Image (cartoon, rainbow, N blue to C red):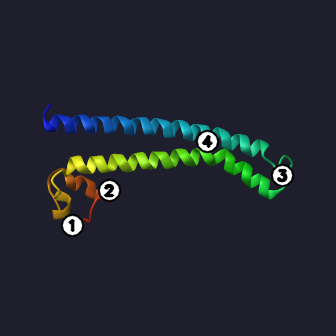
């Protein structure tokens, strides 16, 4: 396998991972909407009398979503580092690079004065 084929396979795997993350986020958004509707109907001042217990109940319910978002953020940062390595393997980003490293400039990968 040549270096180009290896890079292609890596980028293809990254694209599949991003698709799967999009599916996870879509499912979580749907689930969050259902939880929101349930909370609006069932968590009232009658069911939870004081503010502190109301807040702790809400935090327990949303803790899983926060953990998922943190995990996906770390995964995206790792994929971003992999893509930067593939798109500018020779350290082109320090010299203002050419080639594919310029693609990252629009996504906060570097300064673009032009």
Q: Is residue 77 left or right of residue 5?
A: right
Question: Viewer-nearest of labels 1 and 3?
Answer: 3
**Cβ–Cβ under 8 Å for marks 2 and 4:** no
Q: Earlier in the sequence, mark 1 or mark 2?
A: 2
Label 2 sits on residue: 107
Residue at left offset 58%, top offset 45%: 65
Label 1 sits on residue: 114
Residue at left offset 26%, top offset 65%: 111
Quadrant location, the C terminus: bottom left
For marks 3 and 4, give the CA distance: 21 Å
For marks 1 and 2, give the CA distance: 15 Å
Q: Picture coordinates of residue 57 (x, y %)?
A: 73, 48
Quadrant for residue 113, please give it. bottom left
Disc 4 packing (10 Å; few <14; some 14–19; many ≥20): some
Q: Earlier in the sequence, mark 1 or mark 3?
A: 3
Residue 112 drawn above or below residue 72: below
**Secondary structure of residue under mark 2:** helix
Residue at left offset 72%, top offset 40%: 38
Q: Disc number at residue 32?
A: 4
Q: Is residue 80 left or right of residue 73?
A: left
């Amino acid at each position: 396998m040549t270096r180009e084929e290896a890079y292609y396979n890596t980028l293809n795997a990254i694209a599949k991972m991003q698709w799967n993350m999009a599916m996870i986020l879509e499912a979580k958004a749907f689930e969050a909407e259902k939880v929101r509707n349930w909370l609006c109907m069932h968590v009232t001042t009658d069911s939870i009398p004081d503010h502190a217990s109301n807040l702790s109940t809400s935090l327990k319910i949303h803790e899983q979503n926060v953990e998922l978002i943190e995990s996906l953020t770390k995964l995206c940062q790792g994929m971003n580092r992999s893509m930067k390595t593939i798109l500018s393997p020779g350290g082109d980003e320090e010299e203002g690079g050419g080639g594919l490293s310029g693609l990252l400039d629009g996504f906060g990968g570097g300064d673009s004065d032009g």
